[in-house]
Amino acid sequence: PVIFVHGYNADPGVWGSLREDFRSSGYTDAELFSWGYDTDQSVNETLSGAFAAYVDDVRAQTGAARVDIVAHSFGSLVTRWYIKHGGGLGKVDDWVSLAGPNHGTSTAWACALWSQACRDMTPGSYVQDGLAEGDETPGAVSYTTFWSNCDEVINPDSSVPLTGAANVAAGCLEHNDFLGDDAVAQGVRDAVS
């Protein structure tokens, strides 16, 4: 099964195009899941725990030992924390990040005053430091990132790639264009196949 995890200030509806691409390539609705969550909560103490419960529910529903994860933006931090610090290492096969602020983004300072999620996305935050310590891509999980040099939200662009991951330059895409780009969709399907 594939679990899609949206980004900050979004909802599961953003995955319509990519889910359709997966269905067109042979996946059934019973294999495709979209996790929705309150993006104003903290990555580590709250969201990764809620995501862990969701993964276990998907595994129970499908009988799968492991899941694939496709995350956009802030969802990348939530799911990486789950893998690295939340018991997800043996439960995830493939992890894909679309425009994830994997090393922080300076644009998050604009909302950090009132949003815990934004504070988590700022460079040098507790969450960023916790994800960067030791191995950025631990375990037997296959990690893939997609990044763009035209992303207006992730600054610097070099925040997305991870040491130990397949890091794919997606060309000149704006932040939300990753969700509907055909070449990215094909790359995501390849990464989780």
Image: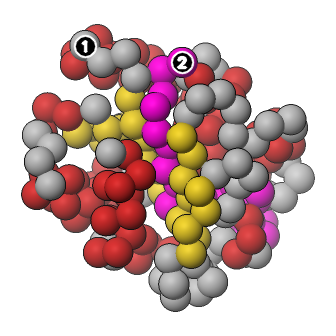
Q: Residue at x 11, y 40 (%)?
A: 28
Find residue 115 and report its horizontal and vertical position in percent. 67, 51
> Is residue 163 positioned above or below 160 on the image?
above
Front-most of residues 88 and 127: 88
Q: Amino acid at mark 1?
A: Gly
Question: Mark 2 sits on what residue?
Answer: 90
Mark nearer the N terminus (2 vs 1): 1
Please state, as top left, top right, bottom left or bottom right, where the C terminus lies in the image.
Answer: top left
Q: Residue at x 46, y 31 (%)?
A: 93
Whole-Å distance between the Cαs marked 2 and 1?
A: 15 Å
Q: Secondary structure at mark 1?
A: loop
Q: Residue 188 is drawn in which quadrant?
A: bottom left
Color style of the picture: secondary structure
Magenta-drawn segment: 90-112
Residue 72, numbered label: none
The answer to whether the residue labelled 2 contacts the one labelled 1, judged by CB atoms less than 8 Å apart, is no
Front-most of residues 30 and 171: 171
Find residue 74 and report its horizontal and vertical position in percent. 58, 53
**Residue neighbourhood size for the residue with mark 2, other residues' Cα within 10 Å, grouped as few (<14), some (14–19), many (≥20):** few
Q: Residue at x 62, y 38 (%)?
A: 80
Residue 63, numbered label: 1
Find residue 119 and report its horizontal and vertical position in percent. 76, 51
Is residue 157 rendered to the left or right of residue 87? right
Q: Secondary structure at mark 2?
A: helix
> Is residue 38 at least partly visible in the picture?
no
96 part of magenta stretch: yes
Q: Residue 126 is drawn in which quadrant?
A: top right
Find residue 99 and report its horizontal and vertical position in percent. 56, 65
**Residue neighbourhood size for the residue with mark 1, other residues' Cα within 10 Å, grouped as few (<14), some (14–19), many (≥20):** few
Q: Residue at x 85, y 48 (%)?
A: 125
> Is residue 168 at least partly visible in the picture?
yes
